[in-house]
Amino acid sequence: MKKVGIFGSEYQADKQLVIKRLFEKLASLEAEVFVDRDFYLFLTDALNYEPPVSGILTSDEFDLDVALSLGGDGTFLRTAARVNKQDIPILGINTGRLGFLADVASNDIEDTLDELFKNYYKTEERTLLRLHTEDRVFHGYNYALNEIAILKRDTSSMVTIHTALNGEYLTSYQADGLVISTPTGSTAYSMSVNGPIIIPQSKNLVLSPVAPHSLNVRPLVIPDSFTITLGVESRNKYFLIALDGRSEIFPTGIQLRVSKADYTTKVIKRYNHTFYQTLREKLMWGADTRMK
């Protein structure tokens, strides 16, 4: 564990002390530190801090032993997109708010890095979704770690999303949208539209409608081996496709296909931390205010 890449959020000027602690600890461990270009410019320009680094990451290809994501879950998702298929494990250090993916607290940085450099950690493989579009390509990274959402474009009327599983017609959702979620994303957008929570090791996907115009349409859990085919109708002839929050406007009439990606994202976890602890601590899952 020598080559360490750091990817960070540019919205954490108040976290300067935490950032400096991270670099100081890595220096004490004699790590080769490489920093993402945008984050490095933020450190030098906004914070007037020039950390000791071995190099700047400017391209989409890099050779690292581990990637450190410094921020919240949004930063983690962007880091995963940068890492792409390079099989580099990611450790999320939380300087944001909730922190489901970035679940290492800032006061645990030193202990966590000590464990990391002693190879005392576990790695979880997380499923991603791949979006395939006919006639027009989704620009940029067409994979999602959390979810792919099909949404109405603005405050206009709802969309109709014709949905098939492995080529067999399922239903036509009349709603504000449809969220297709991985187990990782089941505690994100999908949960906010009443989708179920699924543990990361599950081999499933979830289809959760957004504000459906029907009382009997519920989220559906399917095997992650299924291929989902979608066709969208909208009165204003356009709709949104959002992959982990990265959205583009598409015209109706385009067929969409969503399937499990052919690679996974490697997420580093501490041995003393579990998904169930995260549920209890972050979401107050099962908490009873009557219990003191």
Image (tube, rainbow, N blue to C red):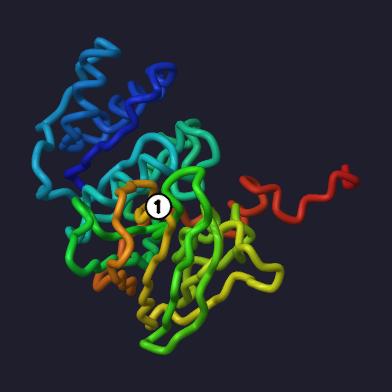
Q: Amino acid at mark 1?
A: Asn
User: Is residue 147 in sight in this rendering?
Assistant: no
Task: Tell which of 100 and 216 is nearer to you.
Answer: 216
Residue 259: x %, y % from top left: 33, 74
Residue 181: x %, y % from top left: 46, 64
Check the image and name the residue furthest to the bottom. 168
Q: Residue at x 20, y 25 (%)?
A: 40
Secondary element at image label 1: loop
Q: Which residue is mark 1?
A: 236
Q: Residue at x 19, y 22 (%)?
A: 41
Quarter-of-image position of residue 209 = bottom right
State whether residue 173 is above or below residue 144. Answer: below
Q: Is residue 104 left or right of residue 27?
A: right
State whether residue 237 is above or below residue 260. Answer: above
Residue 75: x %, y % from top left: 36, 40
Q: Identify the image quadrant of the C terminus.
A: top right
Q: Residue at x 24, y 67 (%)?
A: 133
Q: Is residue 159 left or right of residue 21?
A: right
Q: Residue at x 37, y 71 (%)?
A: 231
Check the image and name the residue furthest to the right. 290
User: Is residue 94 in sight in this rendering?
Assistant: yes
Residue 223: x %, y % from top left: 46, 82
